Amino acid sequence: MSANPLHPNLNAEDLALALSGHNFIDGELAPTRSGRTFAVINPATGRKIADAPFSVADDVDLAVHAAQRAQREWADTPARRRGALVIECARLLASHVEELARLVTLETGKAIRTESRPEAEGIADMLQYYGGLAPELKGETVPHRPDVLTLTVREPLGVVGAILPWNAPMYILAMKIGPSLVAGNTVVVKSAEEAPLAVLRVCQILSQVLPKGVLNVVAGYGPECGAPLVAHPGVHKVTFTGSVETGKIIYKTAADKLIPVTLELGGKSPMIVMPDADLDQAAAGAVAGMRFTRQGQSCSASSRMIVHESVHDAFVGKVKALVDAMKIGDPMDEATDIGTIISPAQYDKVCGYIEAGRSLPGTTAVECSTLPADLALGAGLFIRPVMFTGLTNDSKLAREEIFGPVVCVMKFSSYRDALAMANDTDYGLTASVWTRDLKTAMDASLRLQAGFVQVNQNLVAQPGLSYGGYKNSGLGKEASLEAMLDHFTQMKTILVNLA
Ligand code: NAI
Ligand code: MG
């Protein structure tokens, strides 16, 4: 460990141990009141890299009280000053990119070059974006009556509870704390049990800039730590990314307290490939859209590829060739494209779907790339990407979110059928259409029932663009100005009688 614990530390194992067993509450690393811990495992080796505190309601209570104490002064800090501090946070994180990339690789098994480093760069970008939005926290004057001056002001909600998943833990953290902090709220983060370390490190780094208590993080399990955070009377807003099942539990608790929620709950996103599409572009877009470099563990994964029968075989062949050329291997190796699945539970879930797909009559499993031969990686949770062809949209594989490198490829003959198939899902997070025809592109963009629709590309969420689902994919938007104004402030109307 370097002499100053806040200097970048490129030895990820060493850094993991230094963070071991800690929450971050009221400006300091703190152990849990429960006295219990759980192991953080490197999914590429199966080996323990640190302990995380098994936080309970007492820890949540300490963190919420710290956030409450800090909130008034933070809200009273001029908005542009808060924005400047958040931009300063972004600058600090930019000098920790390499350290954070290695740490998140160690705990999640995501490949450093294709995933972890871009994620570490992305968090600085997201905070930089939000910091610049501070002057937009404006109200309006309303032409109500000539003798009454009527205006609106935007005020913070108070303490925000932010519950994170493990698939892009730092990026999702940034999407949640950026708008919360700039709008004048303070935050208690609950990290995911599989990936608590990089999130903890980010919060520790940011404590050099943020006043104590403004940003706190507790690690722990859903029922024992996440649930008490949502239920805490001092928490006035919950923002959550994760499963539909957990999202509904959180929504019910929030309903009892009458507090607002933002829920980002995953998807089963369609990608329609029309017969006139540029097939090379579409195949590259399929690889990007399926997030194969993240082992398909993405809410926005284009996991249902709906392809015109005339180009189906050529498209599948091109995607296979691209994925075959990707290297599955040691996540820390710069040559690796695809790392590991996050945990044994997720591995078993994904393998279960693959076995179910193999036994479906009429279905072909197109397996891609090769598993690593390196014996040191023998315990790693690697899965070969697989495309299932010959499926129908009513099969379990096409209906349920798998969150692994498993694609359903389905054929269509008429555009109308393709649209119907694309929209025949409980989810609605993202969608894309691939065509050279402007009319088809625009028609599909309007008719696809999803919150984030793209034509001839499959980008991830971007700072400045509202991101959020239709249907079971969630409630509310993230990553944009509207997200901050609509979901992290409350509006007050003030009437001044001048008569
Ligand atoms: P999950 O939704 O159970 O967990 C996400 C977060 O919620 C974690 O921090 C967890 O500790 C917390 N949590 C769990 N139960 C809670 C409760 N009762 N109250 C408050 N917080 C609670 O997701 P999990 O178990 O990690 O993965 C299961 C499936 O969910 C995945 O296979 C995938 O399909 C989906 N998922 C979707 C994500 C997305 O980006 N939308 C991210 C992660 C998972
Ligand atoms: Mg769960």
Image (spheres, rainbow, N blue to C red):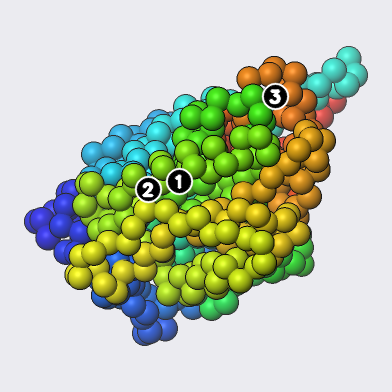
Spot the residue most to the bottom: 35
Q: At 49% from the left edge and 42% from the top edge, which residue is drawn?
A: 317
Residue for badge 3: 441
- Relative to residue 22, is residue 334 drawn left or right? left
**Which x, y percent locates residue 101?**
28, 49
- Relative to residue 320, is residue 135 drawn left or right? right
Which comes before the other along the chain, label 2 or label 3? 2
Dot 2 falls on a residue whose secondary structure is helix
Camera-side residue: 491 or 332? 332
Which comes before the other along the chain, label 1 or label 3? 1
In terms of image quadrants, where is residue 18?
Answer: bottom left
Other-residue count near label 3 (Cα within 10 Å), few / some / many at <14 / 14–19 / ≥20:
some
Spot the residue most to the top: 146
Residue for badge 2: 324
Dot 3 falls on a residue whose secondary structure is helix
Q: At 66% from the left edge and 34% from the top edge, which residue is drawn?
A: 310
Tell me if residue 99 comes above or below residue 438 in the rendering.
below
- Relative to residue 378, is residue 166 drawn left or right? right
- Relative to residue 389, is residue 53 drawn left or right? left
- Estimate the spatial distance between the alpha carbons at disc 2 and disc 3, rounded to whole Å: 30 Å
Q: At 78% from the left edge and 50% from the top edge, which residue is drawn?
A: 424
**Residue type (three-letter) at the residue carrying disc 1:** Lys
Camera-side residue: 331 or 170? 331
**Residue type (three-letter) at the residue carrying disc 2:** Asp
Q: Are marks 2 and 1 in contact (CB under 8 Å)?
A: yes
Dot 1 falls on a residue whose secondary structure is helix
- Estimate the spatial distance between the alpha carbons at disc 2 and disc 1, rounded to whole Å: 6 Å
Residue for badge 1: 320
**Which x, y percent locates residue 472?**
73, 55
